[in-house]
Amino acid sequence: MPASSSSSSLGQRAFDRLMQLRGISDHPDNLTRLFLSPSHRQAAEAVKQMMTQAGCDTVEIDALGTVVGRYHGKAADAPALLIGSHIDTVKDAGSYDGTLGVVAGIGVVEALKQAGRRLPFTLEILAFGDEENVRFPSNLSSSRALAGTFDAATLDGVDEDGISFRQALLDFGGKPGAIGPLARDASKVIGYLEVHIEQGPVLQHENLPVGIVTAINGASRRRVSVTGEAGHAGTVPMALRLDALTAASEMVLAVETLGAKAPLTVATVGRLAVSPNAVNVIPGGVQFTLDMRGPDDAERIAMVDAIEQACRTIAARRKVRLEIAPFYDAPACPCSPSLQTALAEAVARHQIRPLHLPSGAGHDAMAMAALCPIGMLFVRCTDGISHNPAEFSSQSDIDQAIRILLDAIEHLASQSVS
Ligand SMILES: [Zn+2]
């Protein structure tokens, strides 16, 4: 009998766990749970207890603070399918970002345990601690440690109080010297699955509870500087001006047009500074930023080239000087086609239209891709709001997501040769 039919309250149990973790915060008035803080320790202990109660055979908090719960497969040396997300939060956070993926994994183990089911592979539930990149100048260090790409220099980074990553890890009860051996043997890992709130409005717009992630978007960022000539706003005739702001304005509109040219690319001017920024002076200089993303690297690079070329053309016509400086370029991280199929088929078996969509935000799955195939299931969140206390996913959507995850895992198990 499939485990899913024996558990009628997966969403309720997940919701209870989310609400329990929501109360564990560094701040008395809101949810703020920074990496390696006392509340992170407390949440890790709570997750450890949840994993044990759900039926994990072993649970530990590793050298870097990641909670690892294992539900053994039929064979003692079976390879592992990893399911995870993060329990750190931004400041004044919502209750679902990251934590949902952890309680989803716990729910899967609980359903299997209650049904007395053992799979041909071990399930490993992971609660990472360093995803939000808020406290230290590190990036996905918990998942990088497992993937074998942890950079030891990260330990020297300091937070805004001058506390080093190394010291905070020691205070947490971790072991800076034991991070290297956390790297997993790729031959013992089948894949990594992550359930996460969408953090965007697409699923709500499509009226769907879940969606299958195709790739985590690649991103390119540029600093653009436009130099014209400042002048008296009253005395210089319109035809004789070299107005940096009107030139930049044309560029901003070109960014909007070219960003929308391919269906899944996005381009944003998020910051713009005008100088001298005075009511009676023609703007002599403008600096703005470009943030350009997309799930397909060739498409993103074509967009970046087109935007840069459009800015050059506008600058030449308006006789202003233009400088474009790249400061960030990261390739897209594709999700495994076979894990996408496994998730999509499970979605379809639940009478839900399988919608494939890219992820505009980064996730632990990005780091795990260096180790194994990755798959992600997005859950609808109201109005796409996240990193905000108003973040919300309904209990019934959460229930569907966990059932689909469980269904996909059971089908992977039935296809497994071992
Ligand atoms: Zn997250």
Image: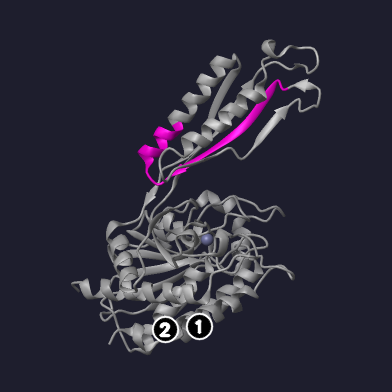
Residue 181 in picture, x, y percent from top left:
41, 62
Question: Is 86 left, or right, of 115 in this rendering?
Answer: right
Mark 2 Cα shell of 10 Å, populated few (<14), some (14-19), many (≥20): many
Amino acid on which disc 1 is placed: Arg
Q: In the drawing, what numbered circle is on residue 95?
A: none
Residue extending furthest toward the left:
417
Give the magenta range. 283-304
Question: Residue at 47% of width from left, 84% of height from top?
Answer: 52
| Residue 106 location, quadrant | bottom left
Read off the residue under disc 2: 110
Mark 2 touches mark 1? (CB < 8 Å): yes
Question: Residue at 50% of width from left, 79% of height from top?
Answer: 14
Residue 185 in picture, x, y percent from top left:
32, 62
Mark 1 Cα shell of 10 Å, populated few (<14), some (14-19), many (≥20): some
Which element carries disc 2, helix, strand or loop? helix
Residue 209 in picture, x, y percent from top left:
45, 68
Which element carries disc 1, helix, strand or loop? helix
